Amino acid sequence: MYGVCGCCGALRPRYKRLVDNIFPEDPEDGLVKANMEKLTFYALSAPEKLDRIGAYLSERLSRDVARHRYGYVCIAMEALDQLLMACHCQSINLFVESFLKMVRKLLEADKPNLQILGTNSFVKFANIEEDTPSYHRSYDFFVSRFSEMCHSNYEDPDIRTKIRMAGIKGLQGVVRKTVNDELQANIWDPQHMDKIVPSLLFNLQSGEGTESRSPSPLQASEKERESPAELTERCFRELLGRSAYGNIKNAVTPVLMHLDNHSLWEGKTFAVRCFKIIMYSIQSQHSHLVIQQLLGHLDANSKSSATVRAGIVEVLLESAAIAASGSVGPTVLEVFNTLLRHLRLSVDYELTGSYDRINIGTKIIKEHEERQLQEAVIRTIGSFANTLPTYQRSEVMLFIMGKVPIPGMHPTLPSTGSGPEGNRMIQVMLLKSLRQVTCGFQTTNMLTALPNSFLDPLLSFALLEDAEIRLLVLEILVSLIDRHDNLPKFSTISIISDISVLKLKVDKCSRQDNLFMKKHAQHLYRHIYLCSKEQSSMQPHFEKLYSLLALISMELANEEVVVDLIRVALALQDLALSSEEMLPVYNRCAIHALSSAYLNLISQLTTVPAFCQHVHEVIEMRQKESPYLLPEDVFIENPKIPKTLEKLEGELLFQQAKITEVLGGSGYNTERLATPYVPQFTDEDRLSKRKSVGETISLQVEVESRNSPEKEERTPAEEITFETLKNTIVDSVGVEEQEKERRRQVVEKFQKAPFEEIAAHCGARATMLQSKLNQIFEITIRPPPSPSGTITSSYGQTQSRSVPVYEMKFPDLCVY
C-alpha cells in the first residue's frame, strides 16, 4: 500500500509537491527557504493556483493541530504569511478565505502559543492593503474571540499578559481592516462596539496603577512600554480618532455603560481619564456630541446616588475644559438648563431626604454628598461659561437670573414642598452659579452686557435680610465691574499711604461707561448705602463694599461720579453717627473704617493735594485718639472696639464743607458736593418694607408739577439769533433758580392747600382733558360721506344723516 502511494507521488499536482517540500523532516530546522522561494515564484506565475495552495496549506495545518505537531503548524503559518505578503492579485480573496480559516483554527485552540501565533498572523494581514474589495468576508468571530482574549484569566501572569496583549492587537487589526472599508462589516455597529470598547476599558483599568507611576511613554522602560494598558490606550485613541460624526454615539455609549456597570463614577479618577482620552482623540468639531451624551446620561441617573451624579458632573467639568469653545455646541442654553435642573433636584433631595417623592425614605440621602454634588455642578457651570464668548455669556447670565426665585418680582419656582427654606437654598445656589459665570467676565460695553433685566433683579437681592445672599450679590457686582484685574489689590480694607505701590491699571472712562453710569449710578450708590445699614453685615460684606467703591472709582468714574462717590462716603460717615438707626457698635466702627479707607483712596486718585492733606490729618488724629475708627483695628480676627461709641466731633470726622472747598478750587461741582447724599427710594423697597411715605408723596408731587396746566400752553415760535443764544447761556443759572422756586411752590401748594382746592384743581384738569379728547375724537372718528347729503345740528355743526343703504342713490357707474 505504501509502495503504491510512493509510486503515485510523482503524479500529485505540482502545487502540492511544492507545498510538501517546504516542510523539513525535523520541524526544528524551520522552513526550507529554497523551496519556499520556489513555491512563491509558482504562486506569482500561476495566480489561479493560489486558492488551491491556500486550501492545501489549511488542510495540512488542521491535521497538524489535531496531531499536536506544533512545529509544523508554525511552519505552515510562516509560509502563509510570506505568500500573503508577496501576492497582490485578483485571486487573493480566495486565498484570504483559507488564511482566515487557519487563523480561526489557531484562535480556537486551547494552547496560548497557538492563539498568539494566530493573532500575530492576523495583525500582519490587517496591515496589508488589498487591491480588490471583498463583499462577503465577516469578522464577527474575530471581534468576539479577540475580546474574549482581552479578558483572559490564565493562571500564569506572564502568559495572561501575553494573551491579553494579543487580544488588544487583534482588535486593533480588526479596526484597521474594517473602519475605512465601506464594503466590510460596519465595525461601529453597537453589536461590535459593545464588545470592543469594554474589552479595551478593562485592560486600561487593570493597568491604571502602573500607568500612574510611569512618567511618560518615552521615559518608560521597554517592559513598561509594552504593557497592556499602554497598548490599550494607543488602540483606544486610534479607534476614536477614526470615528466620524455619526459614529461618536456608538463609541461613547459603551464607555458610559461600562462605568455604570462597574461603579466607576464614584472614584472619578478612571472616568475622568477615559473621557480625557476621548476628548483628546476625537475631532474637535465633534466635542459637543460627547458633552450632550454626558448630559443625557446625567438625566438618566437623576435618581442615582449623589456620588454617581457628582462623578458624571466632574467628568463634564474636565471634558468642557478640554473641548474649549466647541464644548457647548449649538444648544447653549440647554446645557445650562440641564445643569441648573440637577442643581434644583439636588436641593430638593437634600431637603426632602428622599429620591422618591411618593415612597419617602426609600434611600438614605447624605447631606454632605449632596453639597459636594452642588459645588461640582456650580464649578461645571463656570467651566462651560469660560468657553463662551462675551455675548453668549451675557445670555447665560440673564438665563440664570431668570431662574432665581425673587420675592415680589416674579413667582417663585415650583418646589417639592420644601417651602421658604427651599427657595432660599435655590437662591443661594443659583447666585453661586452666577458668580462662577461672571468670574473673568470682561466687556467693553457695560450697557449692553448688563441690561436692566439683569441688574434690577440682581440689585434687589442687596435689600434682603439674608447676609449670605447679600454677600453673593456684592461678589457678582465686583466681578462684573473689575475688567483690569484690580480686584486682588483690594481684597482687604487698609489705609494705604501711597497707592502707587499697588500698580493699579486705570483707563479713561469710555463713552459707553459714562452712559452706563448715567443710567445706573444712583441705583448702585443706593444699594451700597443700604447694604452698609444692615445690622447682619460682617467683615466680608464691608470688604466687598470697599472693593466695589474702589473698582467703580477706577473702572467707571468721571468727574460727576467721583463727586457722587465722595458724597456717598460722607453719607456713610453720617449714617454711623446717626442714633436713629440703632446700629451695633461694631457696625458703626466698621462703617467709619470703610469710609476712611475709601476717602484715603479716592483722595489719592483725584490727586488734589489739599483734599489728600485733609484726609491724612483726620486719619492721623484717629490713629492717635480713636484707632477703632480705622480698618486696622476693626477688620481683624479680634476687633479692638469699645463697648460703647461716644459722640464724635471735630478733627476725628471728615468735614463735608472742607472737602467741598478744596475740591471746588480744582473745578469740581461745589453745589453738588455741598448737598448731602440721600438714597433715592424706589419700588424695590417693598422687598424689605423700607418704602417711605414722604418720598412717595414728593414723587407724586413732582409728577403733578411736570403735568401741570401751565405747561400745556403752547408758546409761539421764537426766532433764534446769536443774541438769543448768548442770553440763554448767560441766564441759565437764573432759569434754574426760577424752576426750583416754581417746583417749591407747587410742592408747598400740595402740602398746605385745603383738600377742596386740590380736588377742584384736579377736577378742572380732568374736564380739560375730556374736552381735548372729545375734539380729537370729533376730528378722527367720522362716519363716511353719504350720498344722501348732510344736515345741520342745533349748534351750527354739520352732522352726517343716517340713511338706510337701500334708500341711497348711487351713480350709474357704481351699479352693475
Image (cartoon, helix red, strand yellow):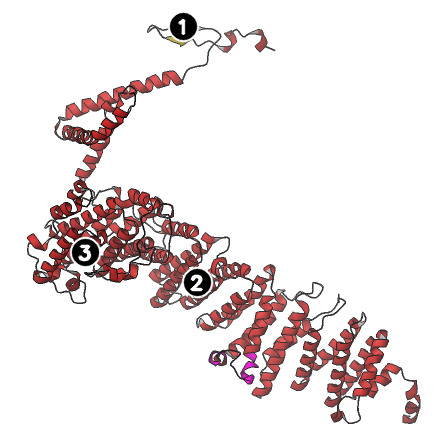
In front of the other: 735 or 278: 735
Q: Disc 1 marks which residue?
A: 791
Q: Is residue 506 visible?
A: yes
Q: Magenta residues?
A: 211-228
Residue 506: x %, y % from top left: 30, 54
Q: Nearer the viewer, mark 2 or mark 3?
A: 3
Q: Disc 2 marks which residue?
A: 303
In front of the other: 14 or 650: 650
Q: Is residue 458 above or below residue 301?
A: above
User: Which SS class for mark 1?
Assistant: strand
Q: Earlier in the sequence, mark 2 or mark 3?
A: 2
Q: Is residue 282 above or below residue 60?
A: above
Inter-mark Cα distance, 2 to 3? 55 Å
Q: Earlier in the sequence, mark 1 or mark 2?
A: 2
Q: Residue at x 15, y 43 (%)?
A: 674
Q: Nearer the viewer, mark 1 or mark 2?
A: 1
> Is 372 on the left-hand or right-hand side of 17?
left
Q: Is residue 111 visible?
A: no
**Amino acid found under the numbered disc labelled 3:** Asn
Q: Residues within 10 Å of mark 2 (few under 14, many from 20)?
A: some
Residue 473: x %, y % from top left: 29, 54
User: Which SS class for mark 2?
Assistant: loop
In front of the other: 669 or 16: 669
> Is 598 on the left-hand or right-hand side of 194?
left
Quadrant showing the N terminus: bottom right
